[in-house]
Amino acid sequence: MRIIETDEGIQDELTVEAFDIFAREMRDKGWNGVNEMIASGIKGGDLLELGPGPGYVGLELTKKICVTSLTGCEISPAMLHVAKKNAAEYNFPASYVLGSCMKMPFENESFDTVISNGSLHEWENPLQAFQEINRVLRHGGRYCITDLRRDVNPLKKALVYHATRPKEMRQGLVSSLNAAYTLSEITELLRHSELSNAVVSSDFFGLCIAGKK
């Protein structure tokens, strides 16, 4: 069974600082979902990132595909501060706003692309979030959501656990895995949403939800 982790994101500034170091390492290893998103067919345009944390996923995409604008919707003010600092390092005029993916502060059909990496397991009501993603996407727009999956092989879990840096993030990895969904659980949730045509797949350590409106 899932063990709910949090629906408030990471608020503590010291934990945010450690998570930023962790996210940089995931970026440098190519383990942050960027390649999977590109492979899913996302094209850029006006891009919305849900739960960007330190912002590296959306910022890396701006380097690899034709992103016109980058907006992040983040529930943690401390994370917003770090994401804005990192965007300045990338020299890209990203916009980060405080908000929840359950009730996004955007007009209908505002974006060509919606992405998220590593935050699905924290969403209080994923079905409602899926409806919101469909609402803010333009016709023909694409979405790609990547996250951990709870039923990952125990050996793989142990390998990734011991490779996680800084060590302070290891317990967070475990709690995130315990809160993550399985492929069958997400497939069932999507079946009742406006994103029912999504393709759900699994990989070494996670799952990927991708589709087109």
Image (cartoon, grey):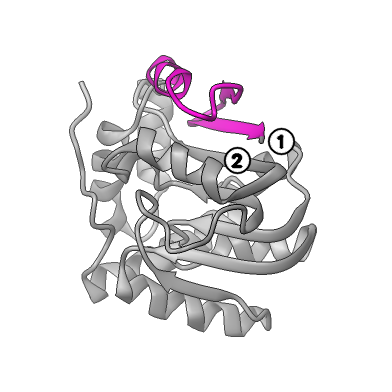
Image disc number at residue 144:
2
Mark 2 element type: strand
Is 70 rendered above or below residue 44?
A: below
The crowding category of the residue bearing disc 2, from other C-alpha atoms within 10 Å (few below 14, some 14 to 19, many at least 20), is many
Q: Quadrant of the C terminus?
A: top right
Q: Residue at left 26%, top 67%? A: 15
* Residues in magenta, as a range: 183-212
Q: Amino acid at mark 2?
A: Cys
- Looking at this view, name the residue that lies furthest to the front: 108
- Looking at this view, name the residue that lies furthest to the right: 66
Q: Residue at left 62%, top 42%? A: 143
Image disc number at residue 174:
none
Q: Amino acid at mark 1?
A: Ser
Q: Residue at left 73%, top 45%? A: 42
Q: CA distance from mark 1 to mark 2?
A: 7 Å
Total marks placed:
2
Mark 1 element type: loop
User: Percent from the top left, x then y, of residue 51?
Assistant: 43, 57
User: Percent from the top left, x then y, of residue 94?
Assistant: 60, 76
Say which residue label 1 marks: 40
